[in-house]
Amino acid sequence: MAAVKETANHSHHPAPSGSTPEIKPLNPLAQTMKMQLSYDELTNCMRCGFCQAACPTFIETGLEAASPRGRIALMKAVVDGIMEPDQKFQNQMDLCLGCRACEPVCPADVKYGHLLEATRDSVEQHVEHRWFIKAARKVAFKQVFPKQNRMKLVGKLLRTYQTSGLQKVAHGVGVMKLFPKNMREMEPILPVASGRGVFETFGTRVPAKGEKIGTVGMFRGCLMDVLFTETNLNTVRLLTEAGFEVIIPETQNCCGALHAHAGEMSQAKELAKKNVRAFREANVDYIASNAGGCGALLVEYDHLLHDEPEYADDGKWFASRVKDISLLLLEKGRLPSFEEPKTAQDDGKPLTITYQDSCHLRNVMRSSGAPRNLMNRVANVKFVELQGSDRCCGSAGIYNIVQTEMANQILEHKMEHVKETNAHLMITSNPGCLLQMKLGIEREKLSDQMEAVHIVDFLYDRLKSDDRSTDSSTK
């Protein structure tokens, strides 16, 4: 477990009732937090408690410190010098999913997500990780995710593992037993990877079908282009069917969301700058995202780059054009028709579907209605609202890997409601959510009656078009 460097040996105990809290000199971590956190945001919290009913970790634990207002109180106490930011403080910041469900219900409009990311960034500057964690973070955040060519290589290697028989051999000799349970369960449900993404398949420019409505820049992502390549390809096809010319800037890279959530804010900013340059040069009307987690950071590039003089204006330009694929199709496109699902029941009964919200799509991009609107336009479909669909599934980037116990607890409760829908398809709008729901379906032994799919694939598979594109090579 990482330890905070240069902190006091003992946390400050609460002052007796009626007395003035003792103010201590700020240690290095507290000083960094004071510089990086917005004190206005810290004091905007009215402690009304509306956030508690929306917070998954508070619901699971019942602890005040595990609620947004509790964590804000801890942050403020550290910045004010009332308490030391010790290991327990860090653990509580790490326990937060970062789902930001607290923000839409906050009457004071506190930007809790910004405070959390600034706190994690501050902590990361003062922790001493164990050597293997430090090495893993360096490889992932600096050597792999930011470099598209290396991501493609990872895709090719993973595809070889999945399709050459190596996966069966690894399972047969028990190699997977060396990995944590959550990773063992996730490995067999991963989609077949690819080293050939959307740019390699379509090139830079894909013309609109019919009269052109506008120009859309396709944000391909990093993991999306490797593990969910077909979804990326189908995103382009849907956009062109809707009347958009699609531009796929080759020089774009990872959005930086995983970096920002993990306290690697400087790296997130560098990635953002490259993306801003790539799409600004393309001069697009809109920027399409098909991953809620990516979109939530993309739409906040204006905040991320607000203190970068050379990029502040371009950050605003970029953020103002980011739209989720569902909202873009619904509000700006020439909406195609969707035919009866190919998997509709033989007896003519409608296909039952349900939907799990992407937290960041709902809470940051504020787009929960568009996916539902599109799903309800498909013929012979019965949409059943999932109870608690607005509550996090427990994926949250890499949360289900680093906070396995809480993630599993949240998923277990989620699946109780999923089973009540009796749905044939569980639809979502984010790759992490999709994998987490696949995991839940496998654990509950529902795979013979239910499948988890991305909304883009659900819609494209039902697109009513005689000349629908079929070039889907992902090798």
Image (spheres, rainbow, N blue to C red):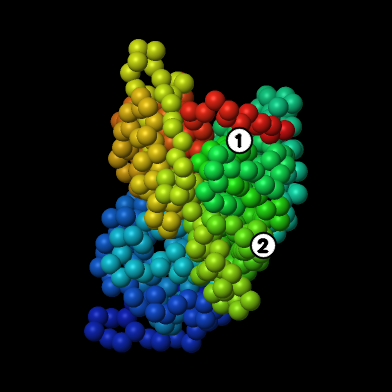
Question: Residue 206 placed where, x, y %?
Answer: 64, 43
Quadrant for the N terminus, please: bottom right
Type of residue at label 1?
Glu
Q: Is mark 1 on a helix, strand or loop?
A: helix
Q: Name which quarter of the figure residue 240 lies in.
A: top right
Question: Residue 357 placed where, x, y %?
Answer: 40, 45
Nearest the eye: 134 or 195: 195
Q: In this view, does 82 lie to the left or right of 453?
A: left
Q: Relative to residue 260, is residue 153 depicted above or below?
A: above
Q: Relative to residue 32, is residue 213 depicted above or below?
A: above
Nearest the eye: 330 or 97: 330
Q: Which residue is disc 2 drawn over?
A: 281
Type of residue at label 2?
Glu
Q: Which residue is disc 1 drawn over?
A: 230
Q: Relative to residue 176, is residue 74 depicted above or below?
A: below
Nearest the eye: 181 or 157: 157
Q: Is residue 163 visible?
A: yes
Nearest to N terminus: mark 2 or mark 1: 1
